[in-house]
Image (tube, grey):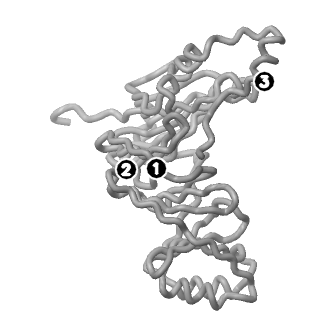
Amino acid sequence: MTRRIGIPLVVLALLLACGYSVPPEPTRRAQCDQLDEVVGQVELVASAERGEGGGRLSPRGTRLLLYIGGEPYILDVATGQKERVVVDCVSATQWVTDDLLLVYCAIDHYYMVDTHDLDNMVTTDLSLVWFSETDLQGAEALLFQAGQVYVLERGVGAARRHVITLGGDTSHMLLLPLPGRDAAVDDLLARIPHQVVPEPRTRAPRYDAPNGQFYASPGSGGVKIYTTDDKLVARAFKSGWNHGILGWAYDSSGVYFKLTIDTTDGAVIYPWVPVFKLLAPTPSPGE
């Protein structure tokens, strides 16, 4: 089952024994959802008080993976619809396309979740196959018969080159030697039509809006939105917390970010990860 977020009771008891004044859990959850400073407007998307949190935005900003009660859900950014992802467990995730979500379950078990239709999401169990430098004929056959091939810049799980094949008789997760380790693997992939899946950006200095009118930047002063001529137009800040930008909404209406407390002790008391949307300003009529 999916691992649920909770506070280790032993650690919490030690903090109390050492004289720490720890508010009750409902108070702590509510505190997570509060920002210290806001310039412009901000929306609370995943609330710690409601048992929501986490967050991973799809590449074009149309889908948001979040957790409700420890279970994974997909949020349609445009409509607000939320639907649960039904898988055995979740150890790590990565968006492959704006609709395809790769889910890694511990002990090298992979699923591909097609979220195009949230009412009828399709989960495919990927057959895991390892290949060595001296045994690539089987990999070549699987790659050529696949309908779609995705090569991850950075894999989820084992330290190998991760290649996903969809379609054909069976969908696979192929684990090949890492880039640069074997010219035969590089030559093979060069002959196969495929899509490279970039490594998710987690600490980029700048995130440009799809419409090209704004950019967002994280830092010690929180999350900030600027115009292209560097004019600050929106800001959200919470002291003592890390501000992780997830990306822009597909329509450039705002940038999504999550909050995590920046100390180990604090993470014991405040383990929740709320998600917010800092809104970009909209032009007034006639502008």
Q: Residue at x 63, y 41 (%)?
A: 3
Percent across and percent down for residue 220 are 62, 30
Amino acid type of the residue that numbered disc 2 sits on in the rendered structure: Thr
Nearer the observer: mark 3 or 2; the answer is 3
As measured in the structure, the alpha-carbon distance from the residue carrying label 1 to the one carrying label 2 is 16 Å
Amino acid type of the residue that numbered disc 3 sits on in the rendered structure: Val
Residue 238 picture quarter: top right
Amino acid type of the residue that numbered disc 1 sits on in the rendered structure: Val
As measured in the structure, the alpha-carbon distance from the residue carrying label 3 to the one carrying label 2 is 39 Å
Q: Residues within 10 Å of mark 1 (few under 14, many from 20)?
A: many
Percent across and percent down for residue 39 are 43, 23
Q: Residue at x 69, y 76 (%)?
A: 130
Mark 3 touches mark 1? (CB < 8 Å): no
Element under disc 3? helix
Q: Nearer the viewer, residue 38 or 102?
A: 102
Percent across and percent down for residue 46 are 46, 32
Q: Nearer the viewer, residue 235 or 199?
A: 199
Q: Residues within 10 Å of mark 2 (few under 14, many from 20)?
A: some
Residue 272 drawn above or below residue 186: above
The answer to which of marks 1 and 2 sits earlier in the sequence is 2
Please give the residue where the numbered disc 1 appears in the rendered image.
Answer: 85
Please give the residue where the numbered disc 3 appears in the rendered image.
Answer: 11
Residue 18 drawn above or below residue 192: above
Q: Residue at x 40, y 31 (%)?
A: 233
Please give the residue where the numbered disc 2 appears in the rendered image.
Answer: 62
